[in-house]
Image (spheres, rainbow, N blue to C red):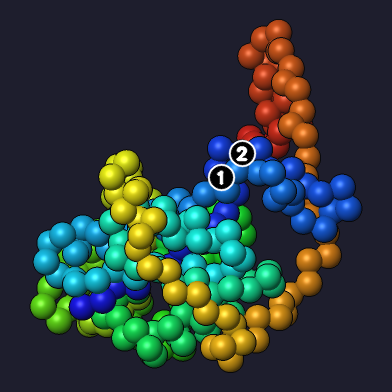
Amino acid sequence: MKILVTVKRVIDYNVQVRVKSDNSGVEKENVKMSMNPPDENAVEEALRIKEAGKADEIIILSIGEEKCQETIRTALAMGADRGILVKTNDEIEPLSVSKIVAKIVETENPGLILMGKQAIDDDSNQTAQMTSALLDWPQATFASKIEMEENTAIITREIDEGLERIKVNIPFIASCDLRLNEPRYASLPNIMKAKKKPIEIKSTEELGIDTKPRIENLKISEPPTRQKGVMVSDVAELVQKLKYEAKVIWVS
């Protein structure tokens, strides 16, 4: 069985994001980029499934500019077998990603697709669900545990009420939660090996996918500056401020 894992190149989570002066987006020039954290969990889970003898090959898919090869190489250094880069300079929306993944599935025929539950740059949390609809495959979102069986899998999901266990047929799509596992660090020998692993480059035109954005960003602005706290002299003043200023205490 093949496992297809999608990874996204995003601004590193330790970087302070800056909004452009014209409010058209965020600054990405000379900014440290890395793999989307939930995608790291997806790669790690694919490796564990393969190490358990339940998969033969792990394919890493990324969509974007030429520099996305760095993100693929990171996954290859962790232990994946090969990569596919679909090149485009457009701002990719979740539906376009889903259409591209569905096209790749036609040629690669994986038994499992693993994705991060969402990207930390846009927090859309849509790609896994829409890909499932396009392929007519079962989906298991927010997976915190994946148990592979012969023709099915048992998935533990994080929901508001607690944990939910579901059974899905193979092939299926899972979006991975941060609680799923602890991603491994790439060793130096594996980093060197990753440089020789193949990355196939395709274009959106070759796949016949229109990636033109359907949504127009009107304005991106910084969040409001947090106001400085104040010292209160006694409990009575604290209660007054909680009631009438913060309005976190209900007044009858």
Residue 166 at what x, y percent from top left? 24, 71
The residue identified by callout 1 is 12
Q: Quadrant of residue 109?
A: bottom left
Instruction: Determine whether the residue tagged by mark 1 lies in a helix, strand or loop.
Output: loop
Residue visible at 78% across and 40% down? 224
The residue identified by callout 2 is 15
Residue type pointed to by label 2 = Val
Residue visible at 70% across and 50% down? 28
Residue visible at 24% across and 71% down? 57
Residue 200 at what x, y percent from top left? 44, 74
Q: Quadrant of residue 13?
A: top right
Q: Quadrant of the C terminus?
A: top right
Mark 2 near mark 1, Cβ–Cβ under 8 Å? yes
Mark 2: give few (<14), some (14-19) or many (20+) Cα within 10 Å: few
Q: Is residue 222 at least partly visible in the picture?
A: yes
Q: Quadrant of the N terminus?
A: bottom left
Residue visible at 19% across and 64% down? 50
Instruction: Determine whether the residue tagged by mark 2 lies in a helix, strand or loop.
Output: loop
Residue 226 relative to residue 191: left or right:
right
Q: Is residue 90 above or below residue 242?
A: below
Q: Quadrant of residue 182?
A: top left
Residue 3 at what x, y percent from top left? 29, 72
Residue in the foreground of this view, choosing between 64 and 174: 64
Residue in the foreground of this view, choosing between 52 and 121: 52
Residue 76 at what x, y percent from top left? 35, 58
Mark 1: give few (<14), some (14-19) or many (20+) Cα within 10 Å: some
